[in-house]
Image (spheres, grey):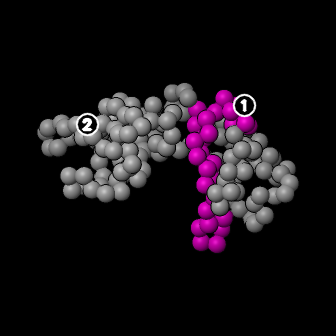
Amino acid sequence: MSKVTDLVRSEIEPIIAARGDEFVDIEYVKEKSQNYLRIYVDKDQPGGIDIDEIAALSEEVSEKLDSLEPDPLPDPYVLELSSPGVERPIKNAKDWEKANGEYIHVGLYQKIDGKKMFEGTLKSYNDEEIELEIKIKTRRKTLTIPRKLIANARFAIEF
């Protein structure tokens, strides 16, 4: 599957960039008996990407995918282009940069202080670790988390 997504990504990223949009992620998955090619895009503007831009981009991407020879997706599939949403994943260096100072959710491979999930404000990050300011009841505590322990991270909404 990653070979398919890598090939598709290399073909569609220039289209996305030419429109001034940002490629976020791609996945090719089978759910029940249907294949889905999901492409997540955003725009660096207040409110992110809008539905009209997604519709126009979807048309261009669809045309490009239909023109590829040999077809990297020979089985029937549903193409879905969408925004990653408010709780978008944090995957690459640009995402971590955007997340600095923001409220995020972090899932871990192994427990720290008896927990595998934390939410808090990202205070700093580097290639080795992140510093997350978390709330414990009424107190705030800064937690240092090694990057190698992070299974996933995403933006979160603070309640």
In percent of the image, x 69 and y 40: which residue is there?
Answer: 13
- Residue type at mark 1 is Ala
Label 2 environment density (alpha carbons within 10 Å; few <14, some 14–19, many ≥20): many
Q: Kindly check if marks 1 and 2 are in contact, taking CB atoms under 8 A apart as contact.
A: no
Q: Amino acid at mark 2?
A: Glu
Judge from the rendering whether residue 123 lies leftward or rightward of residue 99; answer left or right.
left
Q: Which residue is mark 2?
A: 133
**Residue with the mark numbered 1:** 18
- Determine if residue 108 is in view: yes
Q: Secondary structure at mark 2?
A: strand
Q: Main secondary structure of the magenta part?
A: strand
Q: Nearer the viewer, residue 111 or 53?
A: 111
Q: Is residue 29 magenta?
A: yes
Residue placed at 68% from the left, 33% from the top? 17
Q: Residue 31 location, x and y as percent?
A: 59, 67
Left or right side of 94 for 148: left
> Which quarter of the figure is the N terminus placed in?
bottom right
Q: Residue furthest top?
A: 45
Q: Quadrant of residue 130?
A: top left
Front tag of 1 and 2: 2
In this rendering, position of residue 3 left or right of residue 86: right
Q: Residues within 10 Å of mark 1 (few under 14, many from 20)?
A: few
Image position, residue 64 (x, y; %): 80, 46
The local secondary structure at tag 1 comes to helix
Start and end of the magenta stretch? 14-43
Outermost residue toward the left in this view: 138
Task: Find the distance from the CA under tag 1 to the CA under tag 2.
Answer: 38 Å
**Does the rendering let one see residue 49?**
no
Q: Residue furthest bottom?
A: 33
Circle number at residue 52? none
